[in-house]
Amino acid sequence: MSQIIRSTGQSAEIIEDPWYVVRDPAGLDLPGHAHRIIPFQQWRALLENGMTPGAETTGVWLSPDDEFQDDLVQLIQLPLLAIDFPSFRDGRGYSIAYLLRTRCSFTGELRAIGDVLRDQLFYMQRCGFNSFAVRADKDIHDALKGLTTFSVKYQGAVDDPVPLFRKREQATLPDEAWEP
């Protein structure tokens, strides 16, 4: 069984991953994997054919090129959504995560999969990811340190929407002078 990093916001830990990411359509029938993360196109095809994948045992992974807007109502009901990073240079997954958390109010597990590296984890978490499947050739224990690399957050984001300059204004102005 593989391992992932799961973050609760205040802390993060390495855990055994109960989910299996299906990259090959034949992977749907693998014995011993009760929880599967299937590609969006495969999930949509199952729905179109009248099949309903198990809601608690099925997650969906989205690629940056997937057109999933019409299926958002059903997608945000799933327990897990994963966003694939085909390359660490492809930043579209950050935007997808941010929109899922802010505009769509997705509250389930949001996982980064694919070419996920230590240097990205802090920023991925700020965009709304709460679990990370680090690239197989990288040390997951070393990658875990990427969540604590920075101690100060200047910009507002999903995890802390108030930017630093606003916090400083609030701290220096008397209460009656502060008007948001």
Image (cartoon, helix red, strand yellow):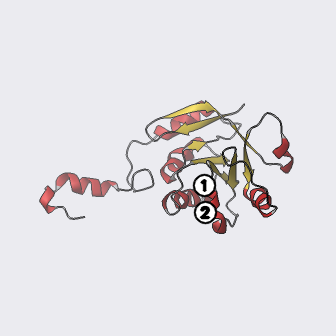
Asked whether, in this view, residue 95 is left or right of residue 30, the answer is left
Q: Quadrant of the C terminus?
A: bottom left
- Label 1 sits on a secondary structure element that is loop
State the image coordinates of residue 76 (x, y, percent, origin top left). 59, 57
Q: Horizontally, is 123 left or right of 52 in the view?
A: left
Q: Quadrant of the N terminus?
A: top right
Tag 2 secondary structure = helix
Q: Quadrant of residue 138?
A: top right
Pick the front one: 115 or 20: 20
Give the residue type that dot 1 points to.
Answer: Gln
Residue pointed to by mark 1 = 77
Crowding near the residue tagged with mark 2, few <14, some 14–19, many ≥20 C-alpha atoms within 10 Å: few
Residue pointed to by mark 2:
73
Q: Are marks 1 and 2 in contact (CB under 8 Å)?
A: yes
Left/right of residue 170 with respect to residue 68 in the rendered view: left
Callout 1: 10 Å neighbours few (<14), some, many (20+)? some
What's the amino acid at mark 2? Val
In the rendered image, residue 151, in percent from the top left (x then y), is placed at: 39, 41
Relative image position of residue 55 (x, y in whole percent): 67, 49
In percent of the image, x 60 and y 31: which residue is there? 15
The location of residue 131, given as percent across then percent down, is: 58, 42
Residue 87 appears in view: no
Residue at coordinates 37% horizontally, 46% vertically from top-left?
152
Residue farthest to the right, as pictured: 26
Nearer-the-camera pick, 88 or 48: 48
The circle drawn on residue 40 is: none
Q: Which residue sits at x=60%, y=54%?
A: 77
> Where 138 sits versus 175, above or below?
above
Marks 1 and 2, Cα distance to the nearest angstrom?
7 Å
Count of marks placed on residues? 2
The reply to whether residue 23 is in sight is yes
